[in-house]
Amino acid sequence: MRALALGAGGVVLAFVLLHVVFAAMIAWWSSHPPAATAFMAERMALLRARDPHATLRYRFVSYERIAGTLKRAMIAAEDAKFVDHEGFDWDGIEVALEKNQRRGHIVAGGSTITQQLAKNLFLTGSRSWLRKGEEAVITLMLESMLDKRRIFELYLNVIEWGSGVFGAEAAAQHYFGVSASRLSAEQAARLAAMAPNPRFYEHHQGAPGLAKKIRIILARMPAADLP
């Protein structure tokens, strides 16, 4: 019994220490750009397994240097309630849970922009209830330590937009040959439509349904509230 208690205590201590490290990293990122993220490291490992010389395309740019069109497109496509919620969209989570129950495994997460940032910064692309729990803890940390504008700025800079392509600047250059500050409304809507499955859409620009998603996002963009 004593050994069990000591083991449980060790697990709790390790959990606390890990999140102290996470908190320190979030505090640093409140005013400094991430050099890399856990998700980038995972993708790099996969790319390097196929090509030892593979590199990532990633360049952090300030919030002001990202076009308002892309900001509105991402809010419209990914998290319309972003400026109002505290990290979780409970209606979206309820819908995702119902879908997961019907399928018998996790196929949807109802993730907000803050949850997606938590995953990208610290976790991997795997899906499990344990990972979702960890994502929730980090989401609360992000919301308590950073303002909405910084959360959104980090998100726009670190999310994946193709094989080895991370962030708005790299995506704008990769797909359209322009800087993130010069994206048109249609270009921004296309990037937003690609975001849920970027490596697929990178090679299937004419995929069924993509054009429809772009039209829907364009229609929703004027109503998007920005931080």
Image: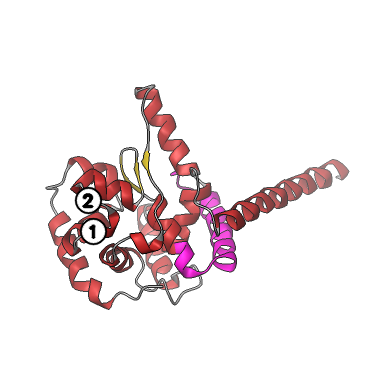
Name the magenta segment's main secondary structure.
helix
Badge 2 marks a residue whose secondary structure is: loop
In this rendering, position of residue 205 left or right of residue 82? left
Q: Residue at x 15, y 46 (%)?
A: 205
How packed is label 1: few (under 14 Cα within 10 Å), some, or many (20 or more)? Answer: some
Q: Say if residue 226 shows up in the picture.
A: yes
Q: Is residue 52 above or below residue 208?
A: above
Residue corresponding to mark 1: 182
Q: How is the structure coloured here?
A: secondary structure
In this rendering, position of residue 141 left or right of residue 9? left
Badge 1 marks a residue whose secondary structure is: helix
Residue 56, position as x, y percentages in the image: 37, 36
* Cβ–Cβ under 8 Å for marks 1 and 2: yes
Residue 178, numbered circle: 2
Disc 1 marks a residue whose amino acid type is Arg
Residue 190, position as x, y percentages in the image: 20, 56
Whether the magenta-drawn stretch holds residue 108 is answered as no
In this rendering, position of residue 220 left or right of residue 15? left
Residue 207, position as x, y percentages in the image: 14, 48
